[in-house]
Image (tube, rainbow, N blue to C red):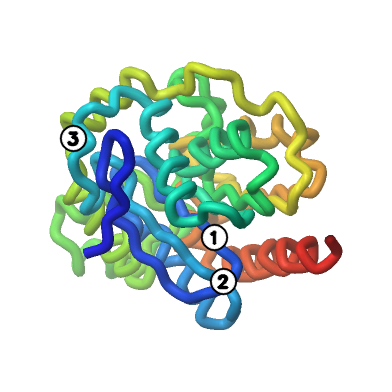
Amino acid sequence: MPYCKVSQAELYYEEIGSGRPIVLIHGFTPDHRLMSGCMEPIFEERAGWRRIYLDLPGMGCSRDYADIESTDGMLEAVLELIDKLVPESRFAVAGESYGGYLTRGIIARKPERVEGAAFICPMIVPENDRRELPMHQVMYEDPALVFQLQPEEYEDFRAMGVVLDPRTWTRYAKEIVSGCRLADAVFLDKIRSRYGFSFPIDREEFGAPSLFLLGRQDATVGYADALRLLELYPRGTFAVLDRAGHNLQIEQEAAFNTLIHEWLRRVEEAREME
């Protein structure tokens, strides 16, 4: 199993393909499969990208992370991994939820190296009670699904899900639940106590191609807080998708694929224009 040794952890990662590097950062509690599950179908149709999927400390197969105390430490581990695996070239980055928050930290620390950023249902405000959140709504439910799942599976899926059908359940179980089962709950509770960065972010415009994919029914991080960043991303596409919650990449699969392809095209184009 490939590991990258950094100062305070050994980070598990998977690398697929060759070409322009892109670092893909999952959310809080799942593992790299959250990102590879939604992104690999896109790259199967798009050559020339070297994908680096990592497991954050306390999640997936990463190990020896006990000395990390905060999100600052999580970011430092990711930055060290990038410096070791992508020592010289610029790179793109895509982050989901907490991974989107870490992406803003990467941009704050190394803006000159990031040639494009995609944010999937990004966490904007660390403090839950300060987020502007819609009420949770189920927009579509296959009535047969409740009979196909165990009661605890159905309750867990329905607590966050906006589109409840066999397709979204299968992907949720494979790409999200499977990783959550590996999470170190005690360690992650420690990180939650210092969840926000200790340094300012979002101080400067980010001029590279970017994409914000936001779920209109996302009751976990919301969508409204992200729209306040609009002017800081002059090359940003901001899409608020109906019929989508915090699992937007699963619930709005076709729109997700189209918009990610379009973002990648803009990153490729910007490199060609230099």
Q: Are marks 2 and 1 in contact (CB under 8 Å)?
A: yes
Give the distance between the C-alpha atoms of the residues marked 3 and 1, in whole angstroms: 28 Å
Looking at the rendered structure, the kind of residue marked 3 is Ala
Quadrant of res 6: top left
Q: Position of residue 140 (x, y in %)?
A: 45, 60
Question: From the viewer's perspective, is residue 20 above or below residue 239?
Answer: below
- At mark 1, the secondary structure is strand
Q: Quadrant of the N terminus?
A: bottom left
Sequence-earlier tag: 3 or 1: 1
- At mark 3, the secondary structure is helix
| Discs 3/1, front | 1
Question: From the viewer's perspective, is residue 12 above or below residue 186?
Answer: below
- Count the numbered circles shown: 3
Give the distance between the C-alpha atoms of the residues marked 3 and 2, in whole angstroms: 34 Å
Residue visible at 61% across and 52% down in the picture: 118
Sequence-earlier tag: 2 or 1: 1
Give the distance between the C-alpha atoms of the residues marked 2 and 1, in whole angstroms: 7 Å
Res 188 label:
none
Look at mark 2 in the image and give the residue it sits on. 49
